[in-house]
């Protein structure tokens, strides 16, 4: 379905056309008509599927611009996602009078307070700063018509359940709640049951575990060959931007020092950096001022980097992290490549990833899975050549 078929206001349609939105993604097509009816939604979809725009477009469409009050509230787990969400809504609402604001910790609260008092229609917030401003009496939720819980599974991972329940308990009038998530575990189910009223359940996860636009490559390495394999790959691939994932901060720091000697436009990001540093790196990476980003899974969830052509798993992750990491490329149908460096100890996790995701693996060199499946040769004494048994 095309956006031009939705009978959108002219200003909104012009903004969508300007940013290149022509056809709805599956999650947008599935949720858009339901959101307009006012019904609650519990929506699951893969990373890079257009979940942000799926609720942003109807949110903007339903705002009454003459009311200078908060009518849409979006709660996200991190500062980076907060900024990203507002940036995307801003592009869509560019030709409309809708006022937006992101509020998060680590930023001058007085500036945020001044903007709220001036008038905001859609507020995007992290739980901590949102509750802080509510306690100060700055935020009035009386006119909120729709609450969006984005990256709901990660909100719970970060321990925000009580905060979310408190915020929703302060909205005593009838309102719509939209829950968007990339995974559905028991805690997310509980949140959906507690916060949603007779929701429409939508899941596109089972149809395709990973986007078809991503090619998945693997290569066997050991401790002595790992760096050489990485640099050979970076030297020979046509890389627009790449994210190299590690499982721990200490490995990110170590690998960045190694990579930066060969590639000066390399940076790193993990939760150990202060918010200002992390935000600066995200902005520079989006602006293509950084080509290689070494990261922990702090960069593996939700963040939309449009120009990432390659994902490299320096350390192999578990199934959920593999899906989120590789989902940073191949966004919105674009082509992307993922390379995982596989050591002997990674084989059990690799088998599980391949079993669940159903991806088609491409191997550089020998496939260690086939080698592991081969029957071992009979024991032979030293000094005697091996001869196959007679048949």
Image (cartoon, rainbow, N blue to C red):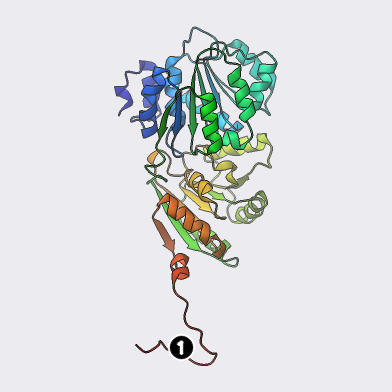
| Residue at point 46%, 44% (across, down) | 329
Residue 210 vs residue 113, the one in the foreground: 210
Q: In this view, does 327 lie above or below 200?
A: below
Q: Write down the residue under mark 1.
A: 386
Residue 246 vs residue 293, the one in the foreground: 246
Residue 241 vs residue 84, the one in the foreground: 84
Q: What element carries label 1?
A: loop
| Residue at point 32%, 18% (across, down) | 7
**Residue 99 visible here:** yes
Number of numbered labels in the structure image: 1
Q: Quadrant of residue 28?
A: top left
Side of 1 relative to 37 (left or right): left
Question: Quadrant location of the C terminus?
Answer: bottom left
Residue 338 point in image, percent of width and height: 46, 52
Question: Quadrant location of the N terminus?
Answer: top left
Side of 305 relative to 16 (left or right): right
Residue 76 point in image, percent of width and height: 57, 29
Residue 262 vs residue 183, the one in the foreground: 183
Side of 374 relative to 302 (left or right): left
Residue 78 point in image, percent of width and height: 60, 33
| Residue at point 48%, 38% (across, down) | 182
Q: In this view, does 104 lie above or below 309?
A: above
**Residue 95 visible here:** no
Q: Which residue lies furthest to the bottom in this view?
A: 384
Residue 283 point in image, percent of width and height: 57, 35
Assess disc 1: are there few (<14), some (14-19) or many (≥20) residues with their C-alpha within 10 Å of its C-alpha. Answer: few
């Amino acid at each position: 379905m095309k956006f031009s078929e939705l009978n959108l206001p002219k200003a909104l349609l012009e903004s969508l056309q300007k940013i290149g939105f022509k056809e709805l993604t599956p999650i947008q097509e599935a949720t858009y008509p339901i959101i307009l009816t006012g019904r609650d939604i519990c929506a699951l979809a893969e990373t890079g599927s257009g979940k942000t725009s799926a609720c942003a477009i109807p949110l903007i469409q339903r705002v009454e611009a003459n009311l200078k009050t908060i009518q849409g509230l979006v709660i996200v787990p991190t500062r980076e996602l907060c900024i990203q969400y507002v940036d995307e809504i801003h592009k869509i609402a560019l030709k409309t009078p809708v006022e937006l604001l992101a509020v998060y910790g680590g930023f001058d609260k007085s500036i945020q307070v001044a903007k709220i008092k001036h008038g905001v229609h859609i507020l995007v917030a992290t739980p901590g700063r949102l509750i802080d401003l509510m306690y100060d009496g700055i935020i009035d939720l009386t006119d909120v018509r729709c609450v969006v819980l984005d990256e709901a599974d990660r909100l719970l991972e970060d321990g925000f359940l009580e905060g979310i329940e408190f915020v929703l308990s302060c909205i005593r009038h009838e309102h719509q709640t939209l829950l968007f998530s990339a995974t559905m575990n028991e805690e997310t189910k509980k949140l959906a049951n507690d916060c949603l009223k007779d929701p429409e359940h939508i899941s596109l996860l089972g149809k395709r575990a990973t986007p078809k636009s991503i090619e998945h490559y693997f290569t066997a390495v050991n401790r002595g060959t790992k760096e050489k394999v990485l640099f050979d790959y970076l030297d020979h691939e046509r890389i627009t931007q790449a994210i190299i994932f590690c499982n721990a901060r200490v490995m990110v720091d170590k690998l960045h020092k190694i990579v930066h000697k060969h590639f000066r436009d390399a940076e790193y990001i993990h939760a150990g950096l202060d918010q200002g540093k992390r935000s600066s790196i995200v902005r520079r990476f989006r602006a293509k001022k950084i080509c290689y980003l070494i990261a922990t899974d702090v960069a593996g969830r939700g963040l939309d980097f449009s120009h990432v052509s390659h994902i490299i798993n320096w350390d192999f992750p578990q199934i959920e992290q593999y899906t989120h990491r590789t989902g940073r490329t191949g966004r919105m149908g674009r082509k992307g490549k993922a390379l995982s460096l596989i050591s002997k100890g990674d084989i059990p996790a690799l088998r599980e990833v391949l079993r669940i995701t159903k991806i088609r693996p491409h191997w550089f060199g020998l496939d260690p899975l086939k080698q592991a499946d081969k029957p071992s040769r009979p024991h032979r004494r030293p000094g005697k050549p091996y001869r196959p048994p007679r048949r």
